Structure formats: structure tokens, C-alpha cells
């Protein structure tokens, strides 16, 4: 059991929910998945009245009661317009958690979210580009300018070495 749990429980008992939340969130951000820490962090957020945050953390634990399920539903509703960006609400270490670490119902929730992510096809590769008359004109002018500078360089070089 991580030492942060003891400190966070003590903070919670003393009524310092903000400090317990800060401790637990910092631990998750630096250490990654720990179901006990996530469960307590969800409890603290719920007690603070931040239901979407409670659901964000409870998303990764086994849901044991209706308030946990309701908080997860609030979180999903909040992020529901763009499910492909749901991961931006999670700390980085939770985005890369190994699936075997998650309880079965958390894996099912994650699979349901991933199932709704629209798959985007890459744009087709252009193999042939049709050039407009404007593109052809610009290329022609660039070629003339390059030829002019080449002519000036060769005349100047011939003058320097005394061919004329």
C-alpha cells in the first residue's frame, strides 16, 4: 500500500480534501495506475462535489455502487461529444496503462469508448499533379531568370580570366 494513501486519508479526516486530492493526483501522474489510489481519489473528488473528476478516476476501477456508476456516466457525458478525445481528460500515465491491470468492467468501459471512436482514413496519395497555366508561367519565368544569371556568370568569368 503506497504511503500516499495514509497521508491522503489523514488529510481527508482533517477536512483538507483539496490537499488529499492534490497528493493522490500527483501520485497517479507520476506513478501510474494504482486501483486503491484511484478509488480514494474518486471518493475525494465526489465529496468535493466534482462528479466528472470522480468519474474520470473511477473509470479505471471496479464500480461497486450506484454513485460510482453515476459519476462515470457524468464524466462520459461531459466528454461525450468527442469520444476520440476522451483520453485528454486522463493523466498521461493512465493513458498508457496495461489492459491486464484493469478490472474486467473497466476494460469493458474502455472497449465501449474505443468502439465509438471514428476511424479516419488517411488522405489518398497524389501520384500525379496537374499544373495550372499559372504554375507553368511561374516555372518558365524562374527558368529564364536562372538562365540569365548563368549567362551573366559565364560572361563575368570569361572577362576575369581574360578570354575577351
Image (cartoon, rainbow, N blue to C red):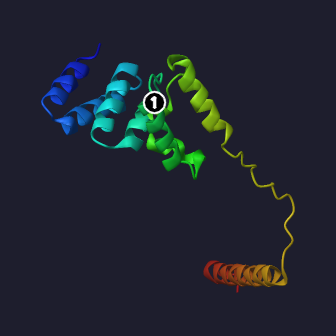
Q: Which residue is outermost to the left?
A: 14
When asked about the image quadrant of residue 27, the answer is top left
- Please state which of residues 49 and 137 is positioned toward the viewer in this rendering: 49
- Residue at figure coordinates x 31%, y 43% from the top left: 49
Q: Is residue 132 left or right of residue 101?
A: right
When asked about the image quadrant of residue 132, the answer is bottom right
The answer to whether residue 150 is visible is: yes
| Quarter of the image where the C terminus is located | bottom right
When asked about the image quadrant of residue 151, the answer is bottom right
- Residue at figure coordinates x 21%, y 26% from the top left: 8
Percent position (x, y) of residue 133? 84, 83
Disc 1 designates what residue?
66
Q: In this view, does 57 lie above or below 163?
A: above
Percent position (x, y) of residue 148? 72, 85
Q: In this view, does 138 lie above or below 15?
A: below
- Please state which of residues 147 and 83 is positioned toward the viewer in this rendering: 83
Amino acid at each position: 500500500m503506497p504511503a500516499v494513501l495514509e497521508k491522503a486519508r489523514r488529510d481527508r479526516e482533517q477536512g483538507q480534501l483539496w490537499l488529499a486530492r492534490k497528493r493522490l493526483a500527483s501520485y497517479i501522474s507520476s506513478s501510474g495506475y494504482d486501483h486503491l489510489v484511484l478509488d480514494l481519489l474518486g471518493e475525494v473528488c465526489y465529496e468535493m462535489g466534482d462528479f466528472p473528476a470522480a468519474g474520470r478516476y473511477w473509470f479505471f476501477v471496479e464500480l461497486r455502487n450506484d454513485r460510482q456508476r453515476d459519476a462515470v456516466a457524468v464524466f462520459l457525458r461531459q466528454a461525450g461529444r468527442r469520444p476520440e478525445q476522451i483520453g485528454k481528460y486522463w493523466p498521461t500515465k493512465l493513458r498508457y496503462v496495461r489492459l491486464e491491470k484493469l478490472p474486467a468492467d473497466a476494460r469493458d468501459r474502455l472497449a465501449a469508448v474505443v468502439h465509438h471512436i471514428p476511424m479516419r482514413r488517411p488522405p489518398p496519395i497524389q501520384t500525379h499533379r496537374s499544373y495550372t497555366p499559372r504554375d507553368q508561367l511561374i516555372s518558365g519565368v524562374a527558368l529564364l531568370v536562372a538562365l540569365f544569371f548563368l549567362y551573366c556568370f559565364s560572361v563575368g568569368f570569361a572577362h576575369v580570366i581574360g578570354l575577351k
